[in-house]
Image (tube, rainbow, N blue to C red):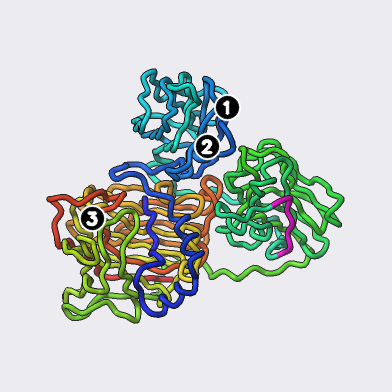
Amino acid sequence: MLRTLAPPLTRPSRAGRGRRLAALGTALLTLLGAYLAVAAPPAGAADPLLSRGRPVTASSAESVAFPASAAVDGDAGTRWSSGFSDPQWLQVDLGVSATLTRVVLRWEAAYARAFTVETSPTGTGAWTTIHTTTAGAGGTQDLVVTGTGRFVRVTTTQRATQYGVSLWEFEVYGSTGPTTPPTTTPPTTPPPGGATLLSYAKPAVASTSQNDGACFGCTPDKAFDSDPASRWATSPTNGWVDPGWIYVDLGATATVTQVVLQWDPAYARSYQIQVSPNASTWTTVYSTTTGQGFREAINVTGTGRYVRMYGTARSSQYGYSLWEFKVYGTGGNPTPPPAMPADPTFPATRLVFADEFNGAAGSKPDPAKWTIDPGTGQNNEVQYYTNNDNANMDGAGSLVIEARRETVNGRDYTSHRMNTGNKFHVQYGRIEARIRVPKGNGLWPAFWMMGADFLTGRPWPYNGEIDIMEVLGRNTQEAYSTLHAPAYNGGGGYGQKYAAPGGVDLSAGYHVWSAEWDSRGITFKIDGQTVFTASKATVESTRGPWIFDHPFYLILNLAVGGDFPGPVDGTTPFPARMLVDYVRVYQ
């Protein structure tokens, strides 16, 4: 659930992948490092970090060098700093109502002596206080709270110095959505009958665009590429102003019937959809002053060759940004987008991949199916993944992945990680494995998938990650299933912690974890019982773009230590074994 894990680009690997990584060069390694800076919550955190990278506003800023956004960027070297007066406030929009359990304030030397932490469903009107103090001591204040709301605000009323107040980080933890996953899928808004996607791969123009370390290549064409992990954004140099706009050339006159906008957190509160025959004279076919961001599907009636989103009021101090801008209708000069595979019918029965691990005792994983992935892990894990030394068949029909207390390459523990990258990739189907997990503090077994475009250079989390199963050895009566994407990842991933069915100890026997995945979403199950449903429509309307409609590859590993499972201790048994009876994929 709280994984920032992605196979590191610098790890030792097989020759083919080594050649690919060498070609990527230093620039890509640097860029990946920036993306991987999204961290998991501290060891032992029961709920995910919700505030990282979310839209944030403040009463004031000392200067442009200390913006509000610096308090939620996960960078311990940047901070928000207010004007030199009382009161001041900093407010974050979590994007969806959340049940809050914890707020961490990491103060700079200019801290608040008196402050409150408040919540609101709307960010306006009345606020509910969930913590208050007149004896703040600065430093790191880790507050246990109880409350519910989409917006969370810290309001300071007494400074401790003659300066303003300043926060390195403002961290909000909690959970979103119901404890029991929804069983219904909210309806999408389909294009009116006979409509065609007209905007794919068409030329686009915008008021400004961003191309820097914070948003690399966020040019207008990215809103029309049918790639939900790329986006357009206005320039921070001259584009964080009103108005801001972007338009597409459909290639010929079209009758437009629907526009779908998938917003980044920098969305428009007020905007118009306009059409034009010549990109100079515009007719408004839709207007709103109450834009809510996320996914907006707008039925319109208009005729023109050009279609424009014209923003007149931003929702935050940032500019405008769209993951997707899709125009549907008739006419134009459409370019068909790449065809998608058909959805499987569940329960899917056509076996397309299987490893039953029936080899002789001591034999190794099948090299035709698995790539061994030696090296270190992420998330402050302490193991070294060896080159196949920690995996073998037990001769009774299971793969044994073994974590050992031994020193290799400067690490005091070893373990095993392997994947099907470049050997088997899949888009849609039932992906399942029968696994017996180990018990012990600091152990972290996982069965998961990575977007295959990671292998050709797309950084995590833009490639997407699907965690079918994660179990923490410190509590083997619960497990996690989680999705990670640009708009929801690390501690803020979209997922569910769930109790083992019947309250059983998952380390006491084998259990089947599966994911039933199609173009509408993913249903996660354990032993045939649904534990979490990730609906594409729900994710797009409450968290951000759905980036899971492309091929993925499978991964098995057993990590030791790190931010999520916490440290090993004297009670952790070594060697510790993760047993895998089989891995199967059906379509």
CA separation, marks 2 and 3? 34 Å
The answer to whether the residue labelled 2 contacts the one labelled 1, judged by CB atoms less than 8 Å apart, is: no
Q: Secondary structure at mark 1?
A: loop
Q: Vertically, is 415 above or below 285? A: below
Which residues make up the magenta segment?
202-208
Q: Vertically, is 56 above or below 479? A: above
Identify the amino acid type marked 2. Answer: Asp
User: Would residue 69 be found to the left or right of residue 465 on screen?
Assistant: right
In what quadrant of the picture does the C terminus appear? bottom left
Q: Which residue is mark 1?
A: 124
Residue 189 point in image, percent of width and height: 63, 51
Q: Can residue 408 be found in the magenta stretch?
A: no
CA separation, marks 1 and 3? 44 Å
Identify the amino acid type marked 1. Answer: Thr
* Front position in the image: 25 or 551: 25
* Front position in the image: 12 or 361: 12
Residue 344 seen in the current view: no
* Front position in the image: 102 or 175: 102
Mark before the other along the chain sequence, 1 or 3: 1
Q: Which mark is residue 443?
A: 3
Quarter residue 200 falls in? bottom right
User: Would residue 177 be found to the left or right of residue 505 on screen?
Assistant: right
Outermost residue on the front side: it is: 162
CA separation, marks 2 and 1? 12 Å
Q: Which mark is residue 93?
A: 2
Residue 303 point in image, percent of width and height: 82, 55
Residue 3 point in image, percent of width and height: 37, 54
Residue at horizontal 35 percent and vertical 42 percent from the top: 47
Q: Residues within 10 Å of mark 3 (few under 14, many from 20)?
A: many
Q: Vertically, is 400 above or below 71? A: below
The answer to whether the residue labelled 2 contacts the one labelled 3, judged by CB atoms less than 8 Å apart, is: no
